[in-house]
Image: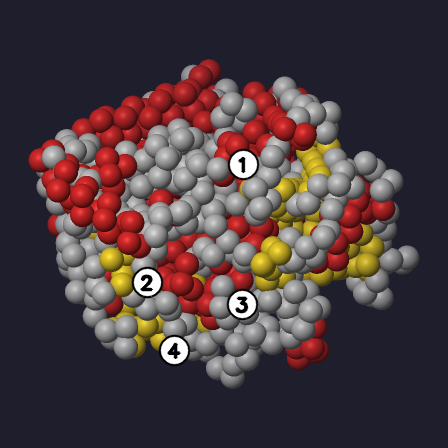
Amino acid sequence: MSSVLWFQAGACSGNTMSFLNAEEPNVVDLIVDFGLELLWHPSLGMELGDQAKKIFTDCASGARPLDIFVLEGTVIRGPDGSGSMDMFAERPMLEWVTELANAASIVVAIGDCACWGGIPAMEPNPSDSTGLQFHKRDKGGFLGPDWRSKSGLPVINIPGCPAHPDWITQVLVALATGRAGDIALDDLHRPQTFFKTFTQTGCTRVQFFEYKQSTTSFGEGTRTGCLFYEFGCRGPMTHSPCNRILWNRQSSKTRAGMPCLGCTEPEFPFFDLAKDTVFKTQKVSGTIPKEVPEGVDHITYMAHAAAARIAAPQWSKEDMFVV
Amino acid sequence: MTTTAPGSDAVDLFVSPLGRVEGDLDVRVTIEDGIVTSAWTEAAMFRGFEIILRGKDPQAGLIVTPRICGICGGSHLYKACYALDTAWQTHVPANATLIRNIAQACETLQSIPRYFYALFAIDLVNKNYAGNPMYDEAVRRFAPYVGTSYQKGVVLSGKPVEVYAIFGGQWPHSSFMVPGGVMSAPSLADVTRATAILNHWKDNWLEKEWLGCSVDRWLEVKSWEDMLAWVDENESQHDSDCGFFIRYAQSIGLDKYGGGVGAYVAPGTYFEPSLYENPTVEGRQAALQGRGAVYAGGQYFEYDQAAVTEDVTHSFYKGERPLHPWDGETVPLDPVASRTEGKYSWAKSPRYDVPGLGRVPLEAGPLARRVAASAPDPAAHQDSDPLFADLLDRLGPSVFVRQMARMHEGPKYFKWAMEWLSQLDLTGSFHTKPAELEDGKGWGATEAARGALQDWIVIEKGKIANYQVVTPTAWNIGPRDSNEALGPIEAALVGTPVADMEDPVELGHVARSFDSCLVCTVHAYDGKSGKEMNQFVINGMV
């Protein structure tokens, strides 16, 4: 039995909503079958009033053991570091976060906001939001680069906007079943088992990428081609299992014709959504993608692209995802 | 721990925090002789999305606004897209309108059981009702995690958004609706699977658990009398979750309080594809299938976006006078310092200028939509449904009526979504590439599950010059305005009986019946000294 306390700070509740879509295990299984003791959650908690506040204060003081503290949402520091732009139970939320993070055995940040600040932290960051242990790609965030939980682990980051329910539930089950030691983290504190692969891994458009065949328009245009060349798809540069573990058991953005926005990476939303960067590939000299797949340089990319276009078979220029 | 002040029945309760769109919400109420006499709603969290959007790419709202609220992110996308469609004067093919309708409806179909069981019905098993003869049955059905209906309702609520994922890639937080259409072009199997998933949800939850009858039988209910007769028609309907709720809600008095301002706003949603191929601000209302209307002072009015303003008299923002959202400003103030000026919320107060009444607060949400659906003179393609006009005539507004309005939309939107699926022309077009105009003004609106959701965008030199989002949570939880008129939830709390100061579940019922994005804590204050007596958490989010 593991005790879990789940708070929402500068959050939209998207990760909670995503979590509620989970199957195998679903939220009921987690509690009934896996004995996850959800001490309190803003949407699912039962305790009211004094009982609820007592849970928070007892966890913070150590009077009640807290195994896992889950945070969804940014840590809001504004204005002027006071945190009073996000009050919870009559205290700035950042005070609760400090105390509960230090009291818990393991701290899990769910979603981009808690990991590295997400959309609220994009410029001009009106609420002075940040993530628990990163601010965008910079180590530090709210708790500082060297912070460790009671178990000696840094904050475990499960990014995404939102995180996929499986990424959340499988990590919670691993922690609850004593497999914390099997969770290997990358340099952004993401579990490698999910975030070593690329969003492109398993994408149904990967053959079009192979032969450098572009989708030419949205809608019916997405019956063929790859979204990387014209529509700003970040699938080749983004680490996620979105095309290995499908969304809502059905699909993924790229499969449905929507370019990957790179939302499991700290820079999301990329280019601060400046003019002409949304759903448009950034290019050099009007033709060459400014960013190329990880580990590839532009010269190699261009040589490979030229050869691939010559090799492209006729079917790669026709519709594939047909009626 | 809660007691009233010695020699007095007057107590203040502080409800904190309530809102998730513009932040957590606190609600403070004054209670005298066991009845709420006044209320203040305080949004307690600020992120500043409207500030973030300024100066960005015009399409930034398609990515940013869904993240305002992950609970109705699909609705945010839908109206953000129409704001651009109107600003860029796009052409939207019929197929794209259908897909947008289907996706928006599926988000709402997801919300109905998820909200009902996970958020609302938990309060129905509150120990304060233990003396009710139906209490044991309520616990068997609705107890969190273990209740027989809770498990099925919460787990099956994920099904309709599987359909969203088929067309949009994922739910929550897709951005697949774009000016001129949608990004996807479904295959045959996408449509057949979507149809099968919705049927599965209908068979296994909507009809089997909720209604105990066919969708068509439920939709024959046109009056309060019909509804009562429906309950007693057979065992299956009597004992369904809906039949049980209708009986139990009356026995615990949910039909007796929580009425609110009795005036409603619904911009409406879902378009008849042939009537909105070239979206305009002016042409919107006539193209709607789910009608919009304002109902105030006993009269219906056509919905007009130009009549909307936001007031910041009691909000933590700078501003001297109510502004229309195209001219709207979002300049945050220090919440601690500005509290001394009578400001108490991060929510603005949206108001609607009703002819003859001035700028008044209006309730947004499913009850507002049901009122709009009973307005006179519907066009042939528009929803026309007298049920809730009759319920309001017979019972008046209450927690119960608001809740039934929401649940009534399950069968209705299911039928609509199936009809839209059947109309898709798979070999047709799903997107018309728009001209990305450098300058323009747009307005997009929809009905999120919890009510009126609208964006106003101003584009200058290819960038966002102004972007204002007016959410249903702001309509409902917004604070007092310059006339000191209470916001709708503030008004709905007034008159609520509180039986047990230790556990004021009635306040939870009222707050939750608006289905705002809430996590609320209730703090009890001594009415005379202002000393805090107790604190309660009313969980919630949708």
Which marked residue is nearer to the observer: mark 2 or mark 4? 2
Q: Give the label, 1 or 2, closer to the camera.
A: 1
* Residue mark closest to the camera, 2 vs 3: 2
The residue located at (49%, 26%) in the rendering is: A23
In the rendered structure, find residue A64 and report the number of the disc placed on it.
none
Q: Which chain carries label 4?
A: B
Q: Residues within 10 Å of mark 2 (few under 14, many from 20)?
A: some
Q: Are marks 2 and 3 on the same chain?
A: yes
Do the residues at discs 3 and 1 belong to one chain? yes
Which residue position holds label 1?
A192
Q: Name the residue under label 4.
A: B327
Position of residue B195 measured from the top left corner of the image (x, y, whole percent) = 27, 27
Q: Position of residue B18 (x, y in %)?
A: 61, 54
* Nearer to us in this view, B519 or A278: A278
**Distance in Å between CA atoms under marks 2 and 3:** 19 Å
Q: Choose mark 1 or mark 4, whichever is in front.
A: 1
Q: Nearer the viewer, mark 3 or mark 1?
A: 1
**Amino acid type, label 2:** Thr
Q: Earlier in the sequence, mark 2 or mark 3?
A: 3
Residue underneath mark 2: A277
Q: Quadrant of residue B387?
A: top left
**Does the rendering let one see residue B401?**
no
Q: The residue under label 3 is which amino acid type?
A: Asn
Q: In what element is the residue under mark 1?
A: helix
Instruction: Indicate the chain on which mark 2 is placed.
Output: A
